[in-house]
Amino acid sequence: MEKHEAAFNALIEQDLKIEPHDWMPDEYRKHLVRQVSQHAHSEVIGMQPEGNWLLRAPSLRSKQVLLAKIQDEGGHGLYLYSVAETLNVSREELITQLHEGKARYSSVFNYPTLNWADIGAIGWLVDGAAIVNQVSLQKTSYGPYSRAMVRICMEESFHQRQGFEIMIHMARGTKEQREMAQDAVNRFWFPALMMFGPHDTDSAHTGNAMKWKIKRESNDYLRQKFIDKTVPQVEFLGLTVPDPNCRLNETTGSYEHSPLDWNEFHDVINGYGPCNTDRLDHHRNVQQENRWVREAAAAYAQKTETVNSSL
Amino acid sequence: METGDNIWEVFIQKKPGIAFKHAGSVHGYDKKMAVQNARDAYCRRGEGRELWVVPSASIVSVPMEDADAYFDPQEDKIYRHPTFYQIPAEVKNI
Ligand SMILES: [Fe+2]
Ligand SMILES: [Fe+2]
């Protein structure tokens, strides 16, 4: 094992990638599976709050855009489950863990989408926060995860822009529309900040993850990066962040913010958010309702599938 | 995994003349579904003009245990490189 461990450490040291057949410490594998599982479930569960507005999108254009965006998120889930499969964990296994409440997803998706501006706020703030995290993860040390992040970042580039475009329309619209825009920012600002996870001082998994270069930048560093690029955008819209202590620190060039309410974060992630039950019930029900399709597909394949390469 | 649900590796050719490149994988119960899923997941933005899907289980790879021996650079066989051969300086274009 010593030779293998040395080879693993050398790859990490030189900023090269670990590939599925390479030897890796058990804890490295475990950390990856946990992180990738949470990431994959977030992509998939994240389709629900947006899907809520698909049939009520205010124009054909916005409906097309939203549909394309949600379809991308489904693909992101697929890429990430595939990453777990390279570690010998099946998609079915991960979904079973999700259904049994043993796996997590980003707590931000347990909030409801109450008005159309929420769809704008999600694309702009929630995808915006996800992008900051995912850009950093393009440099993760696990090859398949890194490649999935490169692909995802490429696709994400329109998600944030379509969200911001909705916000511009709402913020420049009628008084009611402006109020909806502000209301959406009020509700999504802190949940978006909490997407980066606990503070570095309280983060249970950060140590090894940084050492092994699974994570490349700390939660607080990424959160600050997101705040610094987003606050000017909030100001551009003529809106405000729901934080009286959010102001530019002239010395550091960064925005300060109030302490985050981690009690709420833990309540939501532990199942007591406004939509946790809905999200999981919906996923379970659809899985159950579609069972006959999978059975039919399996039966059909068994009857018709031949080995030659034509369709 | 549920019966019949297979994993397929997806290879995409971006333009004629370029080698097919591994893009990722998809699930599919048969090859037709695998091709459709591969198209939907990996070719929505002009990524390619042709694609292959291959059952993941059909891919054969060298066990990592043997990799050192398999991929030995064989630096003793320097006659495999053009620089091994002495050509008089007045001979051009070779
Ligand atoms: Fe995504
Ligand atoms: Fe996205």
Image: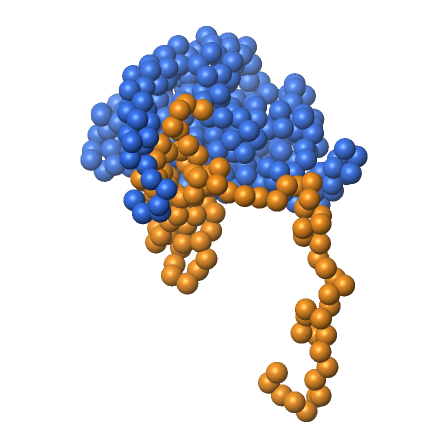
Chain colours: A blue, B orange
**Residue at x-position 53% and y-position 26%:** A89
Most foreground residue, B30 or A182: B30
**Residue at x-position 68% and y-position 70%:** B81
Can see residue B21?
A: yes
Most foreground residue, A255 or A67: A67
Q: Quadrant of residue A114?
A: top left
Q: Position of residue A108 (x, y in %)?
A: 45, 20
Most foreground residue, A92 or A174: A92
Q: Position of residue A142 (x, y in %)?
A: 60, 37
**Residue at x-position 59% and y-position 37%:** A20
Q: Quadrant of residue A276?
A: top left
Can see residue A195?
A: no
**Residue at x-position 74% and y-position 62%:** B75
Answer left or right for A98 relative to B48. right
Residue at the right extreme? A2
Q: Position of residue A274 (x, y in %)?
A: 40, 11
Q: Quadrant of residue A285?
A: top left
Instruction: Report the number of discs.
Output: 0
Residue at the bottom extreme? B90
Q: Position of residue A311 (x, y in %)?
A: 29, 44
Instruction: Tell me the quarter of the image containing the N terminus of chain A.
Output: top right
